[in-house]
Amino acid sequence: MQESEPLKSTNFIHEIIEKDLQSGKYQGRVHTRFPPEPNGYLHIGHAKSICLNFGTAAKYHGLCNLRFDDTNPIKEEQEYIDSIIQDVRWIGFDWDDRLYFASDYFDQMFDYAVQLIKSGKAYVCDLTPEEIRDYRGTLTKPGKESPYRNRSVEENLDLFQRMRAGEFPDGSRVLRAKIDMASPNLNLRDPVMYRILHAAHPRTGDKWRVYPMYDWAHGLEDSIERITHSICTLEFEDHRPLYDWYLDQLGIYHPQQIEFARLNLSYTVMSKRKFLELVKDGYVRGWDDPRMPTIAGLRRRGYAPESIRTFCDRIGVAKGDSTVDIALLEYCLREDLNKRSPRFMAVLRPLKVIIENYPEDKTEMLEAVNNPENPEAGTRIIPFSRIIYIERDDFMENPPKQFYRLAPGREVRLRYAYFITCREVVKDANGQIVELRCLYDPATRGGDAPDGRKVKATLHWVSAFHALNSEARLYEKLFLKENPNEVEEGTDWKSNINPNSLEILSSCKMEPALKGKNPGFICQFERLGYFCVDPDTTSEKMVFNRTVTLRDTWAKLQKQEK
Ligand code: ATP
Ligand code: MG
């Protein structure tokens, strides 16, 4: 765990910006952008970039654009565009009227390419993709020049226009920059700028038969939007010289690129490509499956935007790669939920308890505290009656020494209600426990004995007659290994998927006050964790997701370290 403390004051990007503001480099402007490619849903890694770009602009009274880097029509879809817009807004940021698409600049980019051809800095190459790869060389071996490298400007212009017109099949030709096949930086070995692709684009339709490569397009997009600080992840450090080369050759506005370390989280992968695989192959129920570290998944799981922003703030921004413990994300979540979640009682694995000395048709309304962390949240009433459910785990017929909950002959407290003592265990023909017969002490109403006698356990419960039947979905980590990309020979990251990451409990009993709560409603079920209402809820059956358990592994870790 390297990145734990907020780096607000020492964020190296902010230091660079402050220097630029002092020197007047961009006339006092700060203009950033968040540039997702719409080829999947956003994930928690993107949240780091969103908070950094929008947060930085806000800090320096600048602007931040939302820009779709939609240069690859094969992988991009409107569904992804819509989800990204929703997610960035939900995290809490706004771009006013500055929603842009790289595809809006396709004409401009094409003109820039023509400009490079005219100045002898780009050429049409007929090598096959395999040949281009072979000719490229390696880190230790210089590349070989393409035999098409010295075509005349006229021929290049003619071929490029005909590529655009759709005269040639996919993969038959490309436009390449003419830089240096011997450069130690492989990105500068005559990179491809345009490829032929007979594919319809979600926004430009059938207009284009050539599409720009990411490395050609990206720097131009930033330049066209007059971005000042083009913040991106470390893997683009080696691409910066290429972006610089393009901008310098064209002689156009030049933003400053600054690289930072991407977010990696333990027990998760962090790539849209891999998430797409999980969705397509049915390992999860969709992009918004509550086990997914996508923004949509976290939202459905019960995360509030505040906890995600807090998390992004705490991990800080650094220049070196590291992996953040997923327990820190859950810590931020619990901290947020603890303050604002009302408490309820729910029984996930019900065991029937009949209180034999309680009148058959009596119901009492008992008072319960809504949130001990927040006195203003007040109290509510809970019905109590002769038949109740308790958690199966809260009873043991032959308890070991450390088990203090209910057992034959033992007395425990029912939260907000009475002390009960187990008198008899009733079993079915298979020896399965089906119900308990108990006696209650009427003098202990509210949960304390007037004679001062103590019990060692307090159980949650739900009145059987009043209970709301519902489903609970419990989640475990999606991956078994801290680093899911670490695999045995012959297998891949998917071999590390946890086959038991979802447990569905379909006969849960819940406090009646939960009836009618809408999807997204979040609360704490006493002793069980935080739960939220899932959109799968119908008028017949409510469905709850366990957002997180109450067990705080992060705080424990911190204590151990001290
Ligand atoms: P993925 O590999 O998951 O597909 P990407 O980098 O290809 O991610 P983009 O849509 O290109 O996804 O990303 C948009 C922005 O989000 C980029 O500026 C990128 O640097 C940033 N980003 C992506 N992943 C992370 C991450 N794990 N941590 C921080 N920033 C990220
Ligand atoms: Mg990308």
Image (cartoon, rainbow, N blue to C red):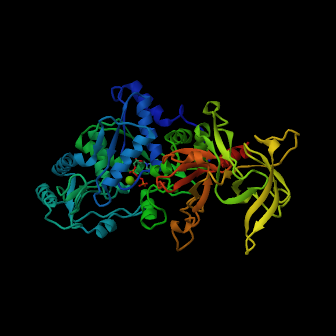
**Looking at the image, which is closer to me, 395 or 253?**
395
Does residue 150 appear in the picture of this structure?
A: yes
> Does 436 sit left or right of 375 as displayed?
right
**Looking at the image, which is closer to me, 239 or 88?**
88
How many marks do you count on the picture? 0
> Does 28 sit left or right of 210 as displayed?
right
Residue 96 vertical placement versus 88 (above, below): above
Residue 79 vertical placement versus 49 (above, below): below
Across and down, in percent, residue 436 comes to 76, 60
Across and down, in percent, residue 35 comes to 36, 45
Across and down, in percent, residue 352 comes to 70, 59
Across and down, in percent, residue 276 comes to 42, 61
> Does 5 sit left or right of 63 as displayed?
right
**Looking at the image, which is closer to me, 133 or 286?**
286
Quadrant including the C terminus: top right
Taking the spot 63% from the left edge, 49% from the top edge, the residue there is 529
Residue 473 vertical placement versus 527 (above, below): below
Does residue 3 appear in the picture of this structure?
A: no
Image quadrant assignment for residue 482: bottom right
